[in-house]
């Protein structure tokens, strides 16, 4: 029997974090909403025109000398801001370069397969250990390894992330390379997120929880 306290904890976690998917209004309601937006936009434009007229009248009242020095200060301020922005960009580029920019760029462009194999090496584990812990068939793993553009199913991608004991953010990054994410609108995703945030990578316990909440299992 599934742990009752754990079941209640997961249930509370789902209740606190579940987000309903947005429902779109019917066409008639959408038209009313668009009319409201257009009306608001027209009012905003009228207010902006009125503000511009006030500013223009104030500017015309100022002496020519004051206008000249005011514009000169604005130009100097814009130039200093531009230089500061340019210097900050150069600094960021230099910092990234010192952190092996080439490696960072390669990792950003990795496919799911490439990222998975890199993580296996970084974690100091083996292919066999990972696909067994994930409950993934050897033939399926061979397809993932042999084709860098292979796109696994979402349960398989998540199971491999759990087998690697990735954090929540690392899991999102890995499965995101296969086009998936963990949605707050999907109960099974929230259950998986609960275990990841608890740093619990026991696939058997995760599947027990998914089964208890009548959700599809991982790695099977």
Image (cartoon, grey):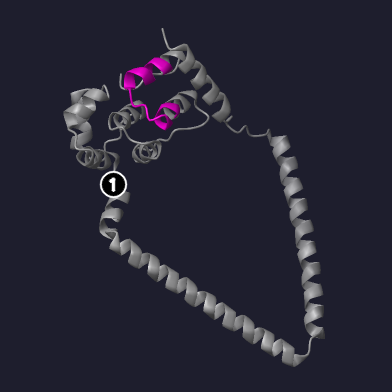
Q: Position of residue 154 (x, y in %)?
A: 36, 29
Residue 164 image offset from top left, x and y in percent: 28, 32
Q: Is residue 149 above or below residue 45?
A: above
Say which quarter of the image contains residue 150.
Answer: top left
Q: Nearer the viewer, residue 26 or 105?
A: 105
In this image, 21 relative to 129: left or right?
Answer: right
Q: Residue at x 53, y 29 (%)?
A: 185
Direction front: furthest residue: 5
Identify the residue at the far top of this view: 1
> Dividing the picture into quarters, in which one does residue 138 lie?
top left
- In the rendered image, the vertical position of residue 59 relative to residue 102, given as above or below: below
Whole-percent x and y of residue 73?
Answer: 63, 84
The residue that label 1 is drawn on is 110
Q: Which residues are magenta?
A: 194-209
Q: Horizontally, is 83 left or right of 205 in the view?
A: right
- Residue 204 painted magenta: yes
């Amino acid at each position: 029997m599934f742990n009752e306290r754990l079941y209640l904890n997961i249930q509370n976690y789902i209740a606190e974090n579940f987000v309903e998917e947005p429902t779109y209004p019917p066409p008639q309601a959408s038209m009313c909403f668009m009319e409201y937006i257009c009306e608001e936009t027209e009012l905003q434009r009228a207010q902006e025109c009125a503000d511009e007229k006030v500013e223009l009248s104030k500017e015309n009242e100022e002496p020519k000398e004051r206008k000249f020095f005011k514009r000169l200060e604005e130009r100097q301020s814009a130039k200093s801001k531009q230089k500061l922005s340019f210097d900050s960009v150069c600094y960021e580029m230099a910092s990234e370069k010192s952190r092996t920019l080439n490696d960072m760029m390669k990792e950003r462009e990795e496919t799911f397969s490439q990222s998975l194999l890199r993580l296996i090496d970084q974690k100091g584990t083996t292919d066999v250990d990972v696909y067994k812990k994930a409950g993934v068939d050897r033939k399926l793993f061979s397809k993932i390894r042999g084709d860098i553009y292979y796109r696994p199913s979402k349960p398989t991608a998540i199971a491999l992330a759990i087998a690697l004991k990735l954090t929540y953010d690392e899991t999102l990054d890995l499965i995101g390379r296969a086009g998936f994410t963990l949605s707050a609108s999907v109960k099974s995703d929230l259950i998986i997120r609960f275990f990841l945030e608890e740093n619990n990578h026991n696939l058997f316990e995760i599947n027990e929880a998914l089964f208890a909440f009548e959700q599809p299992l991982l790695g099977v």
